[in-house]
Image (cartoon, helix red, strand yellow):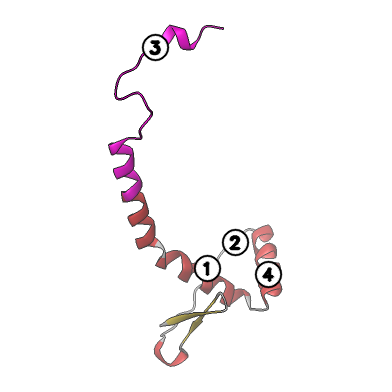
C-alpha cells in the first residue's frame, strides 16, 4: 500500500513484499537519475520505485482518457459548416 505525502509516494513497509532486481542502464541515464534522486533527497532505488509506481497506477486513467478522446473524434467537432462544405479542394490551394 502506498500513500502520497507532499508529492512523494510512501509505502507501509510491513505490508509490502519486496524483490531485488538488476537493471542495465546507459551510463548517461544512470548519471541523470542519480542527480535527480539527489535533488529530491532520496535514493536512486526510491526514485525508480516512485516512477514505476506512478506509471503503473496511471494505466487506468490513460485508458479512460484514450476512450474519451476516441468518442470525441467519432462524434466530431462543430466547424460551423452544418455538415456541408462550400469550397472546392482546388480553391484551398490557389495563391
**Vertical arrangement, residue 5 with respect to residue 33, above or below:** below
Of tags 1 and 3, the one toward the viewer is 3
In the image, 28: left or right of 85? Answer: right
Q: Which residue is mark 3?
A: 87
Magenta residues?
68-95
Is 35 above or below relative to 14?
above
> Which residue of the protein is positioned furthest toward the bottom in this rendering?
14
Q: Which residue is mark 4?
A: 34
Q: Earlier in the sequence, mark 1 or mark 3?
A: 1
The Cα atoms of the two marked residues, 4 and 1, are separated by: 13 Å
Q: Which residue is mark 1?
A: 51
Specify whether residue 90 is painted magenta.
yes
Residue bearing mark 2: 25
What is the spatial separation of the Cα atoms under label 1 and label 2, in whole angstroms? 15 Å
Circle nearer the viewer, 4 or 1: 1
Q: Position of residue 62 (x, y in %)?
A: 39, 56
Sooner in the amino-acid sequence: mark 3 or mark 2: 2
- Circle 1 SS class: helix
* Element assignment for label 2: loop
Q: Which of marks 4 and 2 precedes in the sequence? A: 2
Quadrant occupied by the N terminus: bottom left
Q: Quadrant of residue 32?
A: bottom right
- Which badge, 4 or 3, is on the more N-terminal residue? 4
Amino acid at each position: 500500500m502506498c500513500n502520497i505525502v507532499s508529492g512523494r509516494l510512501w509505502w507501509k513497509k510491513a505490508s509490502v513484499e519486496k524483490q531485488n532486481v538488476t537493471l542495465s542502464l546507459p551510463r548517461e541515464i544512470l548519471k541523470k537519475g542519480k542527480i535527480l534522486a539527489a535533488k529530491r533527497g532520496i535514493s536512486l532505488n526510491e526514485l525508480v520505485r516512485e516512477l514505476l509506481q506512478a506509471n503503473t497506477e496511471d494505466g487506468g486513467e490513460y485508458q479512460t482518457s484514450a476512450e474519451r478522446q476516441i468518442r470525441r473524434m467519432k462524434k466530431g467537432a462543430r466547424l460551423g459548416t452544418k455538415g456541408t462544405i462550400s469550397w472546392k479542394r482546388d480553391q484551398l490551394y490557389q495563391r
